Amino acid sequence: MTMPWKLICKQEDLVEGAGVAAMVNGEQVAIFYVPESGNKVFVIGNWDPVGKANVLSRGLVAHLQEQWVVASPLYKQHFILASGQCLEEDITVPHWQAKLEDGDVFIAIN
Amino acid sequence: MISTVSFLTQKPHIVVIGNGMVGHHFVEQMIAQGGHEEFQITVFGEEPYLAYDRVHLSEYFTGKGAADLAMTDGTLYSEHGVRYFLNSLVSEINRETKQLILQKGDSLSYDKLVLATGSYPFVPPIPGHKRENTFVYRTLDDLDAIRACAKQVTRGTVVGGGLLGLEAANALKNLGLETCVVEFAPRLMPVQLDEKGGAVLKEMIEGLDVKVYTDTATKEIVDGEMAFHRMNFADGSHLETDLILFSAGIRPQDALARQSGLTVGERGGISVNNHCQTSDDDIYAIGECALWNGRVFGLVAPGYAMAKSAAEHLLADFLGRVGVTFTGADMSTKLKLLGCDVGSVGDAHGQSQGCKVFVYQDELSQSYRKMVVSEDGKKLLGAVLVGDNSYYDTLLQYYLNAIDLPEQAQALILPTMGDAPIGLGVDALPATASICSCHNVSKQDISDAVCNGALSVGDVKGITKAATGCGGCAALLKKVVDNELLALGVEVSSDICEHFAYTRQDLYNLVKIGEIKTFDELLKIHGKGHGCEICKPAVGSILASVWNDYVLKKEHISLQDTNDRFLANMQKDGTYSIVPRIPGGEITPDRLIVLGEVAKEYGLYTKVTGGQRIDLFGATLPQLPEIWGKLIAAGFETGQAYGKSLRTVKSCVGSTWCRYGVNDSMKMAIDLENRYKGLRSPHKIKFAVSGCTRECAEAQSKDIGVIATEGGWNLYVCGNGGMKPRHGDLFAKDLDDETLVKYIDRVLMFYTKTADRLQRTSVWMDGLEGGLDYLKEVVIDDKLGLCGELEARMQHVVDTFQCEWKSTLEDPDALKNFRQFVNYEGSDSNVVFVEERNQIRPATEVEKQQLIAKVG
């Protein structure tokens, strides 16, 4: 079965080492561009369930315990970019598979 | 028509009647133990609100809204399948059929019932007590009614001088009323205080313009001649007042228990056993409605303990263990009433047999302290404190843990004379010592949490809930946590994070000496891994301090904390606030109009800040560049309110206008602000300049304070307001303009060079070996031979200043950052504003739901 990849934006829309927000099927997502990582791009939900605002794309990207995470700009909880799992609390934000191909950014819609 | 509400559920049904703090805590306890899996839980609340913090009710008058006081927004309930009904009064219990009848006529069956109906205020049956403009002080609705009435009148009187009465008197005073307190007993707070303590408190309170009548019985309330009411007293005198607030004690709300034939006490209260079961095994009573061992407990901590024991008893089978029982509670209490400290521990009245008493009284500074000790002088039985509660924590621990008193026990209530304060080191506390009585957390619980990896106060709070009730034990909690960490031999590493084995000061030197210009370079040479949210902004700040590059350059942008990245201050809903620089707080009418026009055009909430600037709230990401385009066109610059950098130089008008001013503080403030405005530092920096020793600009509470003298300027350094205030130290006297600036250059650069990350100047100074004298040697005597370099570095920062917003508007790449979405032009639908006092504010979760419901 092939993944239904959806084109979201161009590589030049991304910010190196940080996140941007995008709208995908009416849902806000945060796209992080981390050139040093194997995956290069990660996508999680933009909604911060602790701070209750759409801000995760505006957090700082960090590398902690061998994992790429983003620190929420509101109350600084860390969310793992690859899984959406929060490091401090038992909560998870949605995450999507993503890829960077020939300057285009795609995410997998399930 | 009577219908029956039926729930399709196989689980046994627990109904909780009452949704006050204790009722809510019961639900929390059930959920925490997994009880919602076992039982269907249904909650009925009489008020229109879910449980709120009644302990801090008075804060409703000092700016807190209903939402701030709320203990839950209902999410906890709905997420765990707990059904709740507000505005719902249960009018009858049929114990035979195990059915409840609601006021609206519906009926509902239960398997287990929990009564958490609380109490109601006792209103003495004085003729006239039901007149208009008479109130009680219990619910948010009561407070709304009091506030509405207070707006129309000038005089208010509280009947009752107990704990709640004085709290209510404070509220009336805060509402701007001339306030009186009328107490039937011979002294204030008769339950907690002895005669002397009550007298001292009375004197203190009268010193605050609240008239106190003790030993006074009100005979009747009739029409007043000069005011709305006239209270005629038993001794023939009278008092005229417009508003009367009854706070003469509480009575257990036991009406349902009486109606259904449960056993109640002679003077009210539903009798319960150690599991909080009533005379009917399937019905529990908890909180202020319950009577245990002949006593009603009118504080929240015992209520919470009852809630816990009831929940654990109900879940005993499910949990497979016998739960905790309720065996009474300590009623010691400390409060600040009308700004006066009052504390009461254990047997405050000295009623224990053979007890002995120590008393200390100081009529000059109005304080009174009493200790009640056992006959042999070994144990503390009780204490009374009026005027200074700093003695309370230690006394309470001696009392609760029955620790042997030291030989000179009186020292526990004597003022300290220069030497180290006599306190009980947390080391001396036994493991069973109760640290947080609201959530019943012992020293052992904290120790366990620390051993299991909670290495900060925040973590310990999260795990144990200590200090999250009334918060009174926060300071003690921190001491215990620190002590436990020390005991574990946890060395507090000074490494900034896992990526750099260096302090901030080391990194600063590495950057400067190695001429390192980017984070990646520094990481490659001196660090490991990929960086995190600790080291990235710290290094970003150091790079900016040393090289003063534009912070949104491609290689720097991912280092910036969200506020620095978007050059604005993020607020709770993800919108931003904007603060343009207004040097020294001086602004022309034309510029003020520009701010007003911009705020109006974008509908921004507008507030004057403490730093004499104007803050515009509620701008969305894409609006930031648009708004700044307009502000810069009008001549404004960024105020860097988002950065760890110079914020403001506060000032008085000085000698140009003020008849007392001895020097031109206004010009000095503007010059200083313009000189240091670009400096990135370990933390934010605030200045102030006063034109004379009257010190209207409050310079001694600032990082850098300057006060005009006949001989020039006095320079104060390392002061702080905020959470831990510190007066600035007088650094040098009678300086001329040039030397003043030179010294400030050196002090600030030395701080920027040597302080830790996020360390304010006050903390930096406190930790500086050699302290103020050392700083003087470095800055004035040039002991380290650094002064030339420090000045040159500062001059570089001054010369390379750029307004970051101006640079951003000229940089199309940087502007791309400010799109809300990279692939969509719309806005964030979660950003919703409502209007309050003619301006916007973010809607609360509840308001958002209501707005959505209306639209839907």
Image (cartoon, coloured by chain):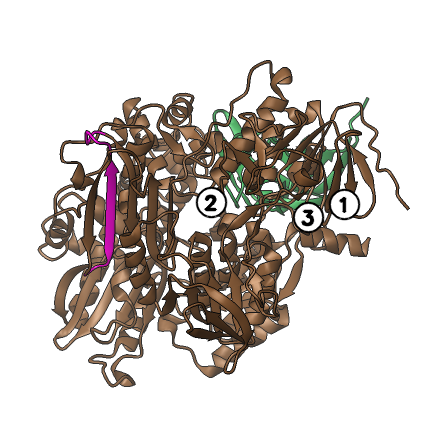
Instruction: Find disc 2 in the rendering and name its residue.
Output: B555
Separation of marks 1 and 2 at Cα, in angstroms: 32 Å
Which span of residues is magenta-colored? B364-378
Residue B46: mark = 3
Answer with mark 3 or mark 2, whichever residue precedes in sequence: 3
| Residue type of the residue flagged with mark 2 | Glu
Query: What secondary structure is found at the residue carrying circle 3?
Result: loop
A3 vs B660: above or below = above
Q: Nearer the viewer, residue B334 or B807?
A: B334
Tint of chain A: green
- Which mark, by number, is residue A26? 1
Query: Along the horizontal axis of the image, is B61 left or right of B367?
Result: right
Q: Is residue B784 left or right of residue B12?
A: left
Q: Mark 1 and 2 residues: CB-CB less than 8 Å, in contact?
A: no
Give SS at disc 1.
loop
For residue B475, side relative to residue B735 (left or right):
right
Residue B497 lies in the magenta-colored region? no
Task: Determine the CA span between mark 3 and mark 1.
Answer: 40 Å
Where residue B154 appears, as percent x and y from the top left, is: 49, 76
From the top left corner, tell me how far across and down residue B809 is, in percent.
Answer: 54, 62
Q: Amino acid at mark 3?
A: Glu
**Quarter location, residue B640:** bottom left
Chain letter of mark 3 equals B
